[in-house]
Amino acid sequence: MLIQIHPVNPEKRILKKIADNLKKGKIYIFPTDTVYAFVCGFDQPKAIEQLYKIKNMDEKQYLSLICKDISMAGKYARFIPDEVFKFMKSHTPGPYTFILPASKEMNRRGMGKRKEVGIRFIKSPLFTMLFEVGEIETPFISTSVREVEAYVTHPEVLDKVYGHLVEAVIDGGPRKNLYSTIIDCTDGMKIIRKGKGEVPELGYFPEMFERE
């Protein structure tokens, strides 16, 4: 099922229903500031298990947390170094995934014990208002929908392929498969995947990379 939502002023009624369903363990496909992603609630181990099955992922692979703000992220990262905190303040929300040491809060979820956690702050009115309207105080769990052979992903295709496995696909229109820039912040700041987010401090500009 496809759900239409206004991209700038999402309808609160629709968001409230989605938030309630996420709290009940439902899975959705959302458009993000990069690609489409599978999303479920944080305290939903059965939904998290289903995410691994849908993507045929090894359970040792990481899923990401979508956090409302740095304060929320601080509960699930054991610490955030000063240089990383400053970068987050100046560059987020945006197309970055931060790998940080995981706090004990991560040990009680459906992802087993984790030494590290991937954290995202997505630039999208949809997620900003979803946290607010749904009164959600925990992160969302997410993993990208990878369409390896396609440069552009269409929501109609996602609905056809995954519609029977998720509650719904949120229609954000066609999306280029440009992923987030992953930055390992466990020991300094190191780019481990070049993506959409530029990191001039580390000598990475997406425009230059895309021309290579």
Image (tube, grey):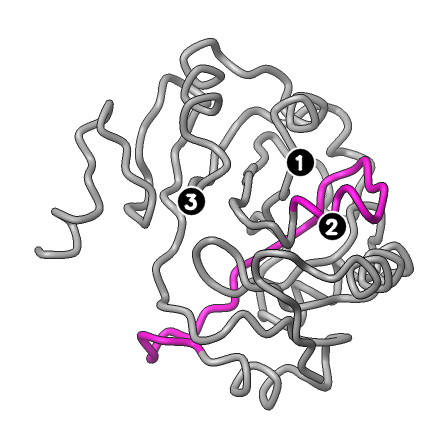
Dot 2 lies on which element? helix
Q: In this view, does 183 lie to the left or right of 136?
A: left
Foreground mark, 2 or 3?
2
Check the image and name the residue furthest to the bottom: 160
Q: Which amino acid does label 3 sit on?
A: Pro
Residue receiving disc 1: 68
First along the sequence among labels 1 and 2: 1
Q: How far apart are marks 2 and 3 (CA)?
A: 18 Å
Question: Which residues lie in the magenta part?
Answer: 128-153
User: In the image, is residue 124 part of the stretch drawn in magenta?
Assistant: no
User: Quadrant where the N terminus lies?
Assistant: bottom right
Residue 192: image x %, image y %?
A: 33, 39
Which residue is label 2 attached to? Answer: 130
- Can you give x and y, in whole percent of width and height, for residue 138 in the image? 78, 38
Question: What's the residue type where badge 2 is placed?
Answer: Leu
Disc nearer the start of the sequence (1/3) = 1
Closer to us: 184 or 172: 172
Mark 2, other Cα within 10 Å: few <14 / some 14–19 / many ≥20: many
